[in-house]
Image (cartoon, grey):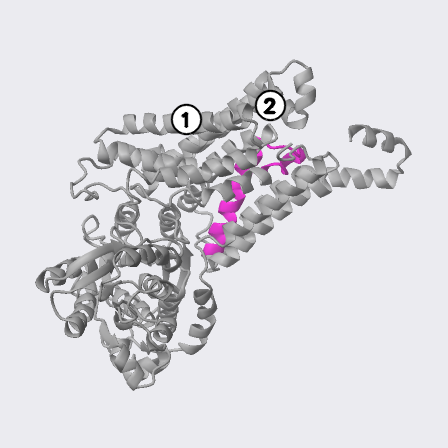
Amino acid sequence: MTQATETKAPVSTSDSSAMDTVRDIVVKYGFIAVTIGFFVYFAVTEPAFATSSSIFAMLKFASVTAILGIGVMFTMVVGGLDLSIGSTAGLSVQLAAMTMVFYNMNAGTAIVAVLLGGLVVGCLNAFLIVVCKIPDLLATLAVMFVIQGAKLIPVNGQSVSGGMVRQDGTVAPGKFDPAFLKIDRGYVGPVPLPVVIMLVVVVVAWFILARTSWGRILYAIGSNPDAARLAGVRVGLHRALAYIMCSLFASVGGLILVSRIGQGDVAAGSSSLLEAVAVALVGTSVLGLAKPNAWGTLLGALLIAIVLTGMNMKGLQYYHQDTAKGLVLLLALLFSFTVSRRKARYTPAT
Amino acid sequence: MRTQRLFIASLASAALVLAGCSQGGTNNEETAKPTETQTADEGETTGGTAEKPAPFDQEVRVAVVQQSGQGDYFQQYLNGTKQQAEALGMKLDVYDAQGNNATQATQLDQAIASGVDAIIVRHGQTDTLCPGVNDALAKDIAVIIYDVEIQSCAPDAIQTQQSDAIMASLVLDQMVKDIGTDQKVGYVNVLGIAPLDRRHAVWEEYKKTNNWDELFFTGTYTNSSATDTAPMVVSALQANGDVVAIYAPYDELTKGTLSAIEQVKGAKSDIKVYGADISTADIELMIAENSSWKATGATDPNAIGAAVVRTLALSMAGQLDTKKVEFPPILITQDFLRENNITNMDELRAKEPALNIADTSSADWIPSVKF
């Protein structure tokens, strides 16, 4: 692809190179402009939209999606996709609730249990994909169903809440630790804690991918695993690590979710998968990078939060919002795959 | 190979996005309904001639934060809410969490941040909603709740609900009349959901008093409860074919039970089913030939949606002297529907004006919407 552009450049007229410059600018800043445009439009037409409390509410709204999106993004970087991320977040919800309500443990133990749960799922995915050589979409699809069902077995399919009566007639001994509820409801200065967690996750992911050699290895595997293998990279190991990272981020997102809901909601997380994949895909279109990246994923989550909040304030129904979400995703994909001259680096299941 | 994979992957993601849009599951019967109900249930307003007190002398902004908006019942509820709000000159924003509790919590935050004067919260989990509700109350936003046990943690919020205890006992009285005592019965319900728990309490009482032998207790609450409950009831009936009646106190569960009875070959065709709730779809099922659905207890979701708005208006004007309002249901039997040739909600409302509950939470300055 790079070769093709290079050979084309000398013969192109000045007109077409001006066109190319315009196209570069559109590709690079188009999506950021779209985001700012939406924000300004809603801020001007809805007086309550750009107030600080409303902006923090939007950021909070974006936090879980952004964190899960970052997780999915890691698997996309190595050319895969983790479909089990939503159910892993759901598993975290169940694990946290059970640890505190059934076993009467405190917030710290619950957090450790949740992260361990994420680690186990990540290792399972990695084992199935790398060792058993099952294509990642299929392996994680199977794992998604297994977790969705298995997490409900110990709770008999019931949502776990403090003081609940269990199937055997006994009252559960524990309740949600107030400290645990602070994960979603706490503040650092004026900033809600989940927003801080989101920013930390994004910075960590950005640093790993853009500033470390490991990040370059992951991208190399994504664009050409065979070349990476020939260059001496242990492709299997690094793909495994990417899936483990993904599940760990999923459990961090799950921690915020369960703290927000305040009970072990059986349905939690199941709808998060699609949004996470969507924002990570939207992220590929930012700055003309045409590859999964951390800041782009954050921007994707913010854009969706902005659009949905604005539409809510305008009194539009959920089906309008679903349509808008789909259109935003489509627009981003057009930026990445069609308008961009750089060939999009994300081709799943390669 | 590469293009092929790319194609498969994009197909998969397209399917995922589509699946995402249908979050909440669709029941054909229900998706087909809203258009019909919306045209049919155009309410008419009566009364409201007196001058409106503050704050209704100017526009009042209200947000509805609903846990779910899909399905017949929820559409009708929102329809009633919208029409009553319009009659009172309120501007209404609707936040719909599509069955996702975490989304409902964030949407409650967003509603508060959007600077509304009042918030109507419909359904959801007590633990999830408490912090937001208390936050809103602290910011002087009036909060009215429908069908959530909120007063345990937010005593200043106004709690409203249909009276599930009355609904259950009306239907179970009919069941006693029909089958008598000392019988083998089945039970289809899901615990952990406030209104179903309240109906369960009444069921336990009736079971004991009438010495009914409960042979099975099954059911599930999902995005498509009727479809998912049916196979569970099929298995239960295959194992316990000798039940004479089944109580399924939520119309999705009742529907699942009816379809299970149809599927089980050799099940006694005279099993009587007692349900809850009403809609045009439910009426069709009740009056169908050989239908097992004998009786249901119901309120009109349109009327409830409107009554909640009136209750909110009274409270904002400082004229509500209670924090808890219950809306009374009525008993509807299969015989009544058949004798009066009732085939839809409009005809039912015409025969049963009590469904309108237009006198509940009314005042001379509130134009009451009737359906």
Which badge, 2 or 1, is on the more N-terminal residue? Answer: 1
Asked if marks 2 and 1 touch (Cβ < 8 Å), the reply is: no
Q: Which of the two residues, B356 or B174, is positioned nearer the viewer here?
A: B174
Q: Give the magenta part as a residue range.
A: A283-312
- The residue drawn where x is 29% and y is 33% is A180
Q: Is residue A190 left or right of residue A238?
A: left
Establish if A187 lies above or below B257.
Answer: above
Mark 2 secondary-structure assignment: helix
Mark 2 closeness class: few <14, some 14–19, many ≥20 residues within 10 Å: many
- Dot 2 and dot 1 within a common chain: yes
Residue A24 in the image: state x and y as whole percent. Answer: 73, 37
Q: Which of the two residues, B138 or A133, is positioned nearer the viewer here?
A: A133
Residue positioned most to the top: A232
- The residue drawn where x is 15% and y is 70% is B176
The quarter of the picture where residue B57 lies is bottom left
Residue position marked by numbered label 2 in the rendering: A218
What amino acid type should be assigned to the residue bearing mark 1? Val
Mark 1 secondary-structure assignment: helix
Quadrant of the snapshot with the C terminus of chain B: bottom left
Point out which mark residue A120 bears. 1
Residue A113 in the image: state x and y as whole percent. Answer: 33, 27
